[in-house]
Amino acid sequence: MKLSDEGMCFACGPNNPIGLKLTFAFEDGKYVTRFTPRREHQGYTGITHGGILSTLLDEAMAKLVYTMNQRAITAELKIRLKKPVPTGEELVVSGWVVAEARRLIECAAEARDTSGEIVAEATGKMVKV
């Protein structure tokens, strides 16, 4: 399988007109982005949709692996949504590598609110292709 990128990734693609347009940087050994969910990212009124939170966590892990020059795709994603996340409040989302084997990269990610509380967390397994 050949992986290519035309800038249309929903999470980070600069060419996707409806995408999240996430940008990342390394901070304290983690790959970090900041994102403020808007009204169009809600499920119930004023509460960020869990699928958006899952996307943020998955992207923090997948984009990190991509930055490591590994071509891999998410094979397993486990999410724990710890509390409702209001729209309009900035989240800090971080991803890091936990372990790496021949074909598998295990990662973890978390999203924190403005008070520093973890509002969602994930583990993921990325399979190299």
Image (tube, rainbow, N blue to C red):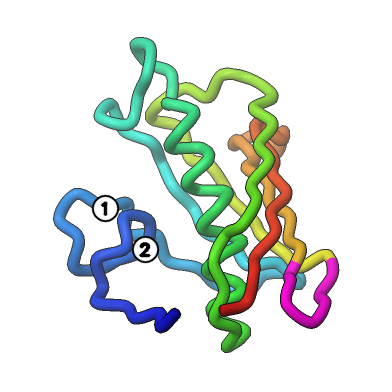
Q: Quadrant of the N terminus?
A: bottom left
Q: Are marks 2 and 1 in contact (CB under 8 Å)?
A: yes
Numbered marks: total: 2
Question: Could you say where residue 70 lies in the image, as x and y percent from the top left?
Answer: 60, 84
Real-space CA distance between mark 2 and mark 1, rounded to the nearest whole angstrom: 7 Å
Closer to the camera in the image, 4 or 49: 4
Closer to the camera in the image, 114 or 44: 44
Q: Indicate the secondary structure of the residue bearing disc 2.
A: loop
Residue at (57% x, 48% y) in the render? 57
10 Å crowding of disc 1: few (<14), some (14-19), many (20+): some
Query: Quarter of the image holding residue 124?
Result: bottom right
Residue interval drawn in magenta: 99-105
Q: Which residue is mark 1?
A: 19
Question: Could you say where residue 48 lies in the image, as x and y percent from the top left?
Answer: 43, 26
User: Where residue 12 is drawn, which disc sits there?
Assistant: 2
Q: Indicate the secondary structure of the residue bearing disc 1.
A: loop
Q: Is residue 66 magenta?
A: no
